[in-house]
Amino acid sequence: MAELEAILRGVVAGFPRALGRALSWVENGHPAGRELLRRLPRRQGWLPTVGFTGPPGAGKSTLIEHVGLRLQGRGERVAVLAVDPSSPFSGGALLADRLRMPRLVAAGGFVRSLATRGALGGLAAACADCLEVLRAAPFSWVLVETVGVGQDEVDVASVVDTVVLLQVPGLGDDVQLAKAGVMEIAHVFVVNKKDRPGAADVVQMLASLLPPPAPAAWRPPVLPVAATTGEGVDELVATLEEHQRFLATSGHHQVLSWERAERRLSAILADLLPRRAKQQTESWRQAVAAVVEGREDPLTVAEKLLQCHRGNG
Ligand SMILES: Nc1nc2c(ncn2[C@@H]2O[C@H](COP(=O)(O)OP(=O)(O)OP(=O)(O)O)[C@@H](O)[C@H]2O)c(=O)[nH]1
Ligand SMILES: [Mg+2]
């Protein structure tokens, strides 16, 4: 496939068009995407990935653009994935992507939105696959934006190294945080819109919710930021670098790689197994009937299906 070869070369060279195409294939579960993932060169070394999450309108995009600009300014190469399940844009809508973070794109950053339809294993899996594509390209940082604070965000957080949780004054934040269980997954807390009244209270409240410091553990800092003016962004970038150093020197890279591989395999299997089982229409129908009629319990039936499947290769 000459086109696949060209896209592979383009990805490795970091060409935006090739990257956009490759990410569309992967995002849409296109067969060419699977072939591409199989053939991507393995990256040497670690590619730092940072997820930014928080409620709608908290300033994630504004902040990511600033962070990206700082990094690009120092000669780093930055890619941004904006994960947006509800996005009307998909399939490499280059124009929409450019409109998202124009200054970062003008500075040479790569920005892509991700609507994730049809990938095996859901949003987090699609995101993980897209990160694999970016790992083969010459980027030195990847920043991922996710909207909201729900299960999807917790899942997406599991594919990045560093999770930045944005909060803003005036949202009844403590309730939201406690409910979503995202306190546990954040490595850095940002209180954005520090120019607004109440920001200092949110900083204090977050600091009071943190667990007591433990030896050799990462302690999430709480950073007040104003993304519109860039105030506090230098401190945030320094913190992101510090967290990456912590991961590198504390043996976390191996742990993260192992956990990610396990999660990916589990997610793919959870998707593949029912699909395969249903392809055997008659045995699937009989299996369901056995459960409906109470002749056998679901676990026994599922185990039989697995065995039967193994018999079929
Ligand atoms: N006053 C103030 N406004 C800000 C700040 N940061 C962002 N905003 C504004 O907040 C609004 C939302 O910013 P975005 O960066 O689009 O927020 P987001 O979290 O990416 O939003 P979604 O992607 O829609 O969830 C915009 O109007 C920004 O200009 C800040 O530090 N102070
Ligand atoms: Mg945004």
Image (tube, helix red, strand yellow):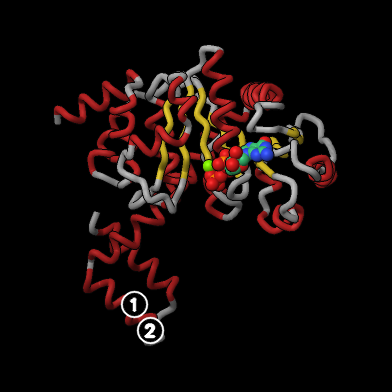
> Cβ–Cβ below 8 Å for labels 1 and 2?
yes
| Label 2 element class | helix
Q: Is residue 246 visible?
A: no
* Residue 166 seen in the figure: yes
Q: Residue 290 location in percent, x, y?
A: 35, 81
Q: In this view, does 255 lie above or below 105?
A: below
Label 1 CB less than 8 angstroms from ligand 1: no
What residue is rendered at 48% in x and 32% in y? 101
- CA gap between label 1 and label 2 equals 6 Å
* Vertical placement of residue 301 versus 209, above or below: below
Kindly identify which residue carries mark 2: 292
Badge 1: residue crowd in 10 Å (few <14, some 14–19, many ≥20): some
Q: Is residue 6 left or right of residue 23?
A: left
Q: Residue at x 81, y 43 (%)?
A: 211
The answer to which of 87 and 5 lies nearer the viewer is 87
Residue at image point 41% right, 56% down: 270
Q: Amino acid under label 1?
A: Val
> In the image, 91: left or right of 116?
left
Q: Kindly indicate the quadrant of the structure image that contains residue 244.
A: top right
Q: Which residue occupies the foreground of this view, 71 or 35?
A: 71
Q: Nearer the viewer, residue 92 or 9?
A: 92
Q: Position of residue 224 (x, y in %)?
A: 75, 34
Residue at the image position 42 percent from the left and 72 percent from the top: 300
State the image quarter where residue 186 is shown. top right
Quadrant position of ligand 1: top right
Using a 10 Å C-alpha cutoff, classify the residue at mark 2 as few (fewer than 14 neighbours), some (14 to 19) or many (20 or more). few
Q: Identify residue for label 1.
A: 288
Secondary element at tag 1: helix
The quarter of the picture where the N terminus appears is top left
